[in-house]
Structure formats: structure tokens, C-alpha cells
Amino acid sequence: MGERHVLMVGERSGLEYTTIRAEWAAELAALELASYPTADPDDLYDEPSIRLLARDFADGCFAGFDGDSLVAMGLGIRTHFDFADPQHRIAEIVPGDDRSGHRSDGEWYYGTGISTRPEYRRRGIGTELYDLRKGVCRALGLRGIVAGGVIPGYADHKSGMSADDYIAEVRAGRLYDRTLSFQLENGFEAVCALADYIKDPAVDDWAALIVWHNPDHPERRPK
């Protein structure tokens, strides 16, 4: 992978984190595909779209290495977001073709994907990637992070409750979802369910809208 500028060494994972490069696009795309086996590949990053992302917002996208092995990534863009009309699909955020979806004047960091090799999970990598994203928000003065979070546990409950009810149960702590519960533990709020967010028959295409507010943003500071 060549010489890399290390931004951070994970305190728990020991991974070396750096910003993404276009020449890693094929490996990054393969990592995401392996991380979401039930999702439609058309809704995931491919090599050309990651090259666009590296061109437009490399400083907001991170890769985690164990030695020379790329084992984790956290990708995102800057965007505008209307919480009064929150329903959207991931394809609207990451349009493909010749566009990454990044808006250089965007007030929010939109997390478009976090992926980790299965054998490296439960080592604090997700938290470390969220910390890097939060650092971007603070450095750029962004309002915070918004994303459509997958809810894999809903697959076991979809026949008995709506996605909004499932999210409410996870939010209340009465149900555990390995992804959404983890995001709540990392300071995110679960706002609502997103219909047709990503093609994933396991959860009937549902996701959760999650948001983290930057406490250093002027509008969040105590008066």
C-alpha cells in the first residue's frame, strides 16, 4: 500500500488510520461489498464512485490498516439536509455517474458507509471511525453527522412490527440491534425510519435516520 500519513492509531484496535486514496478504490469497494452481503450492490460504492469520492472529499474519508492490510473504512460527504422532510434513499445522496454527491458548502457530514472485515469486529473500530468523523465536523464547523443506519435486527421482527416501532424499541433499550444500539451508544439519536433507503430484502429496504449534533457548533453552545 506504500507509505501512508497516519492520522491516528486506534487506542483499542491498534489500527493505523489515514485518509483514502484513489488507488485503493478497488479494495475499498470490495470491503464494503463483503460487509453488506444482503444489500443490492447497486446501492453500494463501486471502484469509480470511490475514485470520485477520493477526488472530492478525501479528507473526510478514512481507511484503517493493520500493517499493509486494509481492514476498515469510513466514508462520507458534506451535504445539506432538511429535517422537515427527512425521507430519502442512499441513491439520492450518492448519485454515481460522474458525481460523488459531495457539496463543498454542505453544513452536515453525511456518513455514507462504514465497513470492517468480519474478523476485526468488536475491537472498537466503529467508535474510532466515528471519532474521526466527529473530528472532521469540529475542524470544519459542521452541524454534525447524519446518516441512514442499517438495522439488521429488524429482519427478526419485521413480521410483527413496523420499522418505526422497532426503532422506538431499540431507542428505549427494550430491543438490541447490533448496529443501531451501537450508534446510540456513540451519541447518535435515532430520528425515524427511512423507507426504501437501500435495497435489502432482509429488512424490507428499511433503515434508521440517525444524527449526531456537533456540540462545538455555535448553535449548540450554551448561551
Image: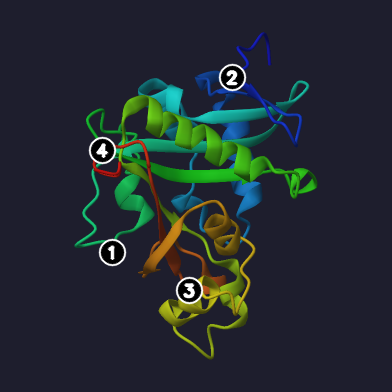
Do the CB atoms of the residues marked 3 and 4 lie less than 8 Å apart? Answer: no
Residue sticking out furthest to the top:
3
| Nearer to the camera, 197 or 181 | 181
Crowding at dot 1, Cα within 10 Å, few <14 / some 14-19 / many 20+, comes out as: some
Alpha-carbon distance for marks 3 and 2?
A: 34 Å
Q: List the residue tagged with mark 4.
A: 107
Helix, strand or loop status at disc 2: loop
Q: Position of residue 216 (x, y in %)?
A: 35, 36
Q: List the residue tagged with mark 1.
A: 87
Q: Vertically, is 167 above or below 32?
A: below
Helix, strand or loop status at disc 1: loop
Alpha-carbon distance for marks 1 and 2?
A: 34 Å
**Does any portion of residue 216 appear in the rendered image?**
yes
Crowding at dot 3, Cα within 10 Å, few <14 / some 14-19 / many 20+, comes out as: many
Q: Position of residue 52 (x, y in %)?
A: 39, 27
Q: List the residue tagged with mark 2.
A: 7
- Dot in front, 1 or 4: 4
Q: List the residue tagged with mark 3.
A: 167
Alpha-carbon distance for marks 3 and 4?
A: 26 Å
- Which kind of residue does numbered mark 2 sit on? Leu
